[in-house]
Image (cartoon, grey):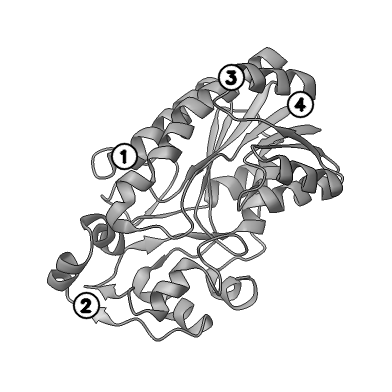
Amino acid sequence: MRVFVAGATGAIGRPLLSALQTAGHEPIAMTRSCEKAEALRVRGIEAVVCDVYDAPTLERALVDARPEKVVHLLTDLPADMNMRRFEREVESTGRLRREGTRNLLAAARAAGTPGIVAESIAFAYAPEGDRVKDEDAPLALEALPFVAEPLAELERQVLDAGGVVLRYGWLYGPGTAFTHDGSWAANLRRRMMPLVGAAGGVFSFVHVDDAASATVAALTRSGPATYNVVDDEPAPMREWLPEYARTVGAPRPWHAPTWLGRLAASRLAIEMTSELRGASNARIKRELGWQPRHASWREGFQTALG
C-alpha cells in the first residue's frame, strides 16, 4: 500500500516510516525541509517537499504520489512547553488541525485517495465522571476550549470523510518530551515539577513505537472510527512522576499544597495535575487486534525512554 505521511519527520512520523517499510508498505514522506527530504531519500523513502497551507502544491503532490491512504500527523508544538504560555503555544497546532486537515482532505479527494488516518489526543476528555474514558466520552470543550475545539473540528472533518481518528496518549521515547534528556526530565532536575495537592490527574502513556504500530494497524480499517492509542495502565500523576524522576536520575518531586500551586503555576497546570482523565485502549484492542509492545509505562520508562 502506498501511504502518504504528512508530518513524517515528527515524533510519531519517524518510527512510522520504518514500521510502514517493515510491513511492506511504500511510504511517501511529506516535509517542508529540502534537507530532511534528501535525508529521507538516502534511506530509500520517497519524499516530497510541501507546505500544507499551499493547497495547489499539496494537491499536485497527492495526485502525483497516487497514495491509497493518507496519514495526518501534523503538529507544531515546542519541545519545551511552557504551561503559562500554553494557550499561545498551541495556536499554530490548532490552525493545522483546522486548516491543514481541510487542505489534506481536499487534496486526497482530488487524488482519488479513499482513506485518511489522523492524529488526535487522548488527554482532552472533559474532567467529569469516570477517571478513565472511552472514545464516546465528550471532549473538554468548556474546560480547554483552545485545545479541544480544534481537535473537535479535526475529528469532525476526518470522520465526515469516512476516516479514522487516532487519539494518542502522552508520547514517550525518542523525539518526545519524555526522554532521559527531555523537557520533563529537565524540569524535574530543576525542581520545577512538584506534585500539587493529591496529584490525582490520570495520565495515559504510549511509546512512540507503539503509536506507530497502531497507525499501521489503522490503515486496514475503514471509517468512520475513533480509537484511543494508549498503554494498559492509566496512572495518577502522584504514581508515575516519582518513578519517571527515579528513572532519569532526577530528585524525587516535592509536594506542594494546592494553594501554593495556584500561586506558582497556571490554572491549566493545576487542573492537569488534579483533574486530567486517562483513556481506555479496549476498543482498539478489540477491533484492530492491536497490542502495545510496552504494555505499561513502568516497563517502558525503564527500557525505552531514549
Front label number (1 vs 3): 3
Residue nearest the observer in this picture, 141 or 150: 150
Residue nearest the observer in this picture, 72 or 44: 44
- Is 68 situated left or right of 202 in this image? right
Which three-letter amino acid code belongs to the residue tagged 1? Phe
Mark 3 = which residue?
55
Front label number (2 vs 3): 3
Q: Do callouts 3 and 4 mark residues in contact (Cβ within 8 Å)? A: no
Residue nearest the observer in this picture, 188 or 199: 188
Which three-letter amino acid code belongs to the residue tagged 4? Pro
Tell me how far mark 2 sits from mark 4, CA to CA.
52 Å
Q: Residue at x 35, y 39 (%)?
A: 148
Q: Position of residue 144 (x, y in %)?
A: 28, 44
Tell me how far mark 1 sits from mark 3, CA to CA.
25 Å
Mark 1 = which residue?
146
Marked residue nearer the N-terminal end (1 or 3) = 3
Marked residue nearer the N-terminal end (2 or 4) = 4
Which three-letter amino acid code belongs to the residue tagged 2? Ala
Q: In terms of secondary structure, where does tag 4 sit?
A: loop
Mark 2 = which residue?
256
User: Taking the image as drawn, is residue 60 in sight?
Assistant: yes
